[in-house]
């Protein structure tokens, strides 16, 4: 897939952007972080900045009209950028001006091209909360090969370029692939870009790391925007991607993707079934959830009242109680006893590396015979009800990254784990203090230790 600009024009644009400081290093660090969340508010001080950086910020990030003379002074000849569809000519207050037809973000080691608001069904979106969460939750460590499925503008490919020896990306939208090709060439990165749906362009190939920000919005089968609408019913797409994982991952490989979780009865059992039979470790974490009314409101994008009503009626007809979204992480560990777990972490970013490491450690050790410490910053929250005999604590919630509802024994266990005694020894001391049967206390402690380790409340002594 060819970039929108030729090599000479790309080099000229790259030099102009660098000279103006229109880079991740050139912008305020807080502004860059806000951009990664799709927030441009930190850029407002640059609206009146008369430097080249201010000019490019107004032009490419705020999509404000800039006088042609001012734009030319920073970018040089504008015709190639106009012909490529990056700029469009116009008039501002009676003066010839140009306005960006696309967004151009300084991003990581380069730049990222995306559409501004509006556009047709092949709209190419840029930075927002969703790709930011996927990038931040991505497993770390170098890998040989990586695949970015539904790559869009290339956000995940940009991150993978610093981690993988080779990056392959697929998308159903030719427009998105041209944008990604332009982002890669402008940033002097080399991506293999393939046109097609999901994994079809890489059939028969395997990768060490696969990431995907697919069109996971839950709506009737029509496709209004390729970036968000799969045309599949409910959350079938999430199940389909999980089913493909065993055939696309190398031994030890990991797949991570965003998905919707439709709440129909016990939604946890339903989404955990996506990993059944794959032989893969799976951690599925819901990060947000909306009722159908709010969901349709948030995603209708200016649709008419009739369309919104039809969408909501469709959800009601299918008995949808709520729609969640989150991260699915699958790993080909080679173990005969894959672990599948569903959690909730509202508004957070899962530490997937830690969770997989905990699963490996638990399978390779006898948890009761190891020493632990409480994780830094772990908190305990208790609630109590007033009964005939006074206040009675009815819930204990231990929280590190994730929360665990536990009994008083587990609370005392965490307090007793100071790194000097094994969990078995701590349990024996608690049994003596409570006057309980040591065997029963040790037995109940074993499951508590496993749960507290995998949820990050207890850390093993390394």
Image (cartoon, rainbow, N blue to C red):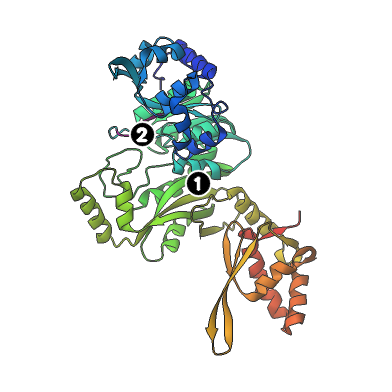
Mark identifier at residue 389: none
Is 124 on the left-hand or right-hand side of 51?
Answer: left
Residue at image position (45%, 43%) is 129
Residue at the limit of the structure toward the bottom, as seen here: 388
For residue 379, which quarter of the picture? bottom right
Judged from this view, the residue extending furthest toward the right is 420
Q: Circle 2 sits on which residue?
A: 172
Q: Residues within 10 Å of mark 2 (few under 14, many from 20)?
A: many
Residue placed under numbered mark 1 in the picture: 246
- Give the number of marks: 2
- Residue at x 46%, y 51% (from the top left corner): 326
- Name the one closer to the observer, 74 or 427: 74
Give the image location of residue 76, x and y in percent.
Answer: 43, 10
Residue nearest the viewer, comparing 52 with 263: 52
Q: Is residue 261 left or right of residue 391?
A: left
Judge whether residue 233 can be spotted in this image: no
Which residue is painted at 41% across and 19% down in the image?
Answer: 2
Q: Relative to the observer, which residue lies in front, 378 or 453?
A: 378
**Magenta segment boundaries in residue numbering:** 114-118
Label 1: which secondary element: helix
Check disc 2 and report its element: helix, strand or loop. Answer: loop
Q: Position of residue 196 (x, y in %)?
A: 37, 33
Tell me if residue 65 comes above or below residue 225 in the rendering.
Answer: above
Relative placement, left or right, of 182 versus 422 is left
């Amino acid at each position: 897939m060819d970039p929108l600009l030729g090599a000479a024009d790309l080099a000229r644009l790259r030099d102009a952007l660098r000279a103006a400081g229109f880079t991740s290093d050139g912008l305020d660090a807080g502004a860059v972080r806000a951009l990664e969340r799709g927030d441009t508010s930190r850029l407002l001080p640059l609206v009146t900045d008369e430097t080249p950086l201010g000019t490019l910020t107004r032009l490419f990030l705020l999509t404000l009209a800039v006088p042609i003379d001012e734009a030319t002074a920073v970018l040089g000849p504008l015709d190639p950028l106009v012909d490529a569809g990056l700029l469009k000519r116009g008039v501002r207050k009676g003066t010839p001006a140009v306005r960006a037809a696309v967004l151009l973000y300084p991003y990581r080691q380069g730049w990222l091209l995306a559409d501004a608001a509006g556009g047709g069904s092949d709209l190419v979106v840029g930075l927002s909360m969703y790709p930011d969460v996927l990038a931040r939750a991505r497993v770390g460590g170098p890998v040989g090969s990586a695949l970015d499925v539904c790559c869009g503008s290339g956000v995940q490919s940009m991150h993978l370029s610093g981690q993988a020896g080779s990056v392959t990306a697929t998308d159903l939208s030719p427009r998105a692939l041209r944008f990604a090709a332009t982002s890669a060439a402008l940033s002097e990165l080399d991506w293999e870009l393939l046109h097609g749906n999901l994994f079809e362009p890489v059939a028969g190939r395997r990768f060490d790391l696969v990431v995907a920000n697919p069109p996971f919005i839950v709506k009737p089968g029509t496709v209004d925007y390729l970036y968000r609408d799969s045309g599949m019913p409910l959350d079938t797409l999430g199940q389909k991607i999980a089913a493909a994982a065993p055939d696309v991952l190398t031994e030890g490989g990991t797949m991570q993707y965003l998905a919707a979780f439709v709440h129909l009865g016990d939604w946890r059992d339903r989404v955990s079934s996506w990993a059944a039979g794959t032989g893969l470790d799976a951690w599925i974490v819901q990060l947000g959830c909306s009722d159908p009314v709010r969901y349709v409101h948030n995603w209708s994008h200016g649709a008419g009242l009739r369309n919104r009503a039809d969408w909501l009626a469709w959800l009601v007809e299918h008995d949808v109680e709520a729609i969640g979204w989150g991260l699915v992480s699958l790993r080909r560990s080679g173990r005969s006893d894959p672990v599948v777990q569903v959690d909730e972490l509202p508004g957070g970013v899962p530490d997937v590396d830690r969770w997989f490491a905990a699963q490996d450690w638990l399978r390779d050790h006898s948890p009761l015979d190891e020493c632990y410490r409480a994780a830094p910053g772990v908190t305990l929250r208790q609630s109590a009800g007033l009964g005939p005999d006074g206040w009675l604590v009815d819930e204990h919630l231990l929280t590190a990254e994730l929360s665990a509802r536990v009994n008083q024994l587990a609370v005392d266990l965490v307090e007793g784990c100071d790194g000097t005694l094994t969990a078995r020894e701590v349990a024996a001391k608690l049994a003596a203090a409570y006057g309980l049967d040591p065997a029963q206390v040790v037995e109940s402690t074993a499951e508590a230790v496993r749960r507290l380790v995998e949820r990050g409340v207890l850390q093993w002594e390394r």
